[in-house]
Image: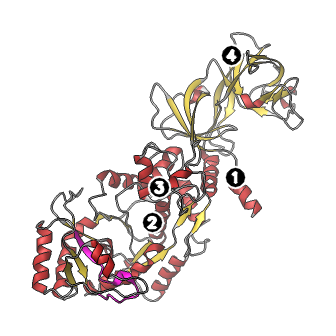
Amino acid sequence: MSESERSLNFLEHIIEEDLKNGFPKDQLRFRFPPEPNGYLHVGHASSICLNFGLGLRYNAPVNLRFDDTNPAKEEQEYVDAIKRDVEWLGYEWSTERYASDYFQQLYDWAVFLIKEGKAYVDSQTSEEMATQKGSPTEPGVESPFRDRSVAENLALFEGMKSGDFEEGKHVLRAKIDMSSSNMLMRDPIMYRVLHKEHHRTNTDWCIYPMYDWTHGESDYIEQVSHSLCTLEFAMHRELYDWFLDQVVKDEKVRPKQREFARRNLSHTVVSKRKLLRLVEEGVVNGWDDPRMPTISGLRRRGFTPESIRNFADTIGIAKRENLIDVSLLEFQVRDHLNKVAPRVMGVLNPLKVVITNYPEGEEEWLDAENNPEDDSAGSRQVPFSREIYIEKEDFREEANKKFFRLKLGKEVRLKNAYIIKAESCTKDENGNIIEVQCAYDPKSKSGSGTEESLRKVKGTLHWVSIEHAIEAEVRLYDRLFTDESPDTHKDKDFMEFINPDSLQVVTGYLEPSLKNAQIEDRVQFQRLGYFCVDPDTSPEKLVFNRTVGLRDSWAKIQQKS
């Protein structure tokens, strides 16, 4: 769908209305403001696509600003990961900014508010402040320190900055309205003491600004025109505007905060705290584990930037939160990989087949199309020999008429090769089939143009030549949780819904064209699904991750609705 064809979302309508009312188009500016306290997840991807998409739509700059005001939880590792994720998704930011860039300006403005009688140093404990703040139905009680003199407040605030006080001894609060119906307006905290080393400012500061004080002021400094947040910040808008009222004294652009609904993904959690717990307790193997909903996890699993952008565009921007079935995300990556992923053959649950009338020691290389969806993809050569592997589930001694794969006395076609007929099978001492003996029709070679090659049989199987097959570790990933909303149960911990079968590791036997596959290469194992080369791959061992199966479960859900 082209940009001109699609309908506008409600945020775009707001921007269009502002432009219609005289806001200069060349002053539009957006930002994506993550806190570097974890890896970005698929929910952040929607916000990235929204803000950078608006930048592209209106040819406006988009800043990448790190909300780095809590050194206790933030690390350079997360900054680097976030930048990689945004770039991988295909976006370029105009300017890289940090809230810490503005620490001095924010401090100076805080001093100004103290001098104006609009901020004060409170020496209550956090428990005392929580009690005196009241409740949604009861007004708060003013702090006993609310009427400190300007001189005392300035001296204490300077002492906080200089490191004279321990953590929790004092905070700086805005003096607003303890009876406000919006509890965020009841003298919110602006600064707290933290004796922690910051990843950029080291130990230069002993006080750190709170989110609500930092965010709007940072938007103003950067001249962000539209500050777009998730719905949880809707109640913060009044405070956002109050803080701006105190510092906006010129004709510069005044930022406008507007909110959109968070879209939750089924069968996962996106809380950074909960994702960190999965990592720390060893449920997953790091932030980029392919079962994680992080962008780096999706990338490692084999998702493409295009599929994630298409997913964000499909779910759109809304005013109400809802649960998006993970099948839609799987549909998007399946749809894109179908167009771009080369087709190859691999067997994950092997059963040996001996073609008894094929000459021993002989081999031939057959032509195989790389991608029927892409005329420019070309073809490759696949080796064929007397002994091959097929999938165990593709053979039965006896089966009903609906089983169109290999069974005794019946024929199937081997993909890109010959028609074979099962004649007998060999079993081990436990009665398990370990080998199938077949005969092939030498005139039925695919693409040869003979009458026999055009003969129709109902089943077509993928296979690999045993002599030429390369072994690979194949990791079969499934959903990490068995429940579609694992973190919404009040009486149960989300960890109780961990899927014990979310990862199975098998040995796969692959056609030799994959010998030199590179990390993040994506392919379709024919009849099995889409797979991606994992970073654990080495010259000694090839490792593949299953991205998604071939089955289009989302389409079936749509048909039922």
On screen, 385 above or below 124? above
The image shows residue 135 at horizontal and vertical percentages of: 40, 82
**Chain-order first, disc 1 or disc 4:** 4
Question: Is disc 3 in contact with disc 2, using a CB cutoff of under 8 Å?
Answer: yes
**Chain-order first, disc 4 or disc 2:** 2
Q: Secondary structure at mark 4?
A: strand
What is the CA distance from the residue labelled 2 to the residue labelled 1? 30 Å
**In this rendering, position of residue 200 left or right of residue 443:** left
**In this rendering, position of residue 547 left or right of residue 87:** right
**Chain-order first, disc 3 or disc 2:** 2
Residue bearing the label numbered 3: 89
Residue bearing the label numbered 2: 52
Seen from the viewer's position, the closer of residues 165 and 296 is 165
Name the residue rendered at 47%, 76% in the picture. Answer: 259
Q: Secondary structure at mark 1?
A: helix
Front of the two marks 4 and 3 = 3
Residue 179: in magenta span = yes
**Chain-order first, disc 1 or disc 3:** 3
Seen from the viewer's position, the closer of residues 309 and 397 is 397
Q: Tell me the crowding category of disc 2: few under 14, some 14 to 19, or many 20 or more residues within 10 angstroms, Cα based.
A: many
Residue bearing the label numbered 1: 553
**In this rendering, position of residue 436 left or right of residue 38:** right
Please, what is the three-letter code of the amino acid marked with disc 1?
Answer: Ser
What is the CA distance from the residue labelled 4 to the residue labelled 2? 54 Å
Please, what is the three-letter code of the amino acid marked with disc 4?
Answer: Glu
Magenta: main secondary structure equals: loop
The image shows residue 386 at horizontal and vertical percentages of: 72, 16
* Residue 130, label in figure: none
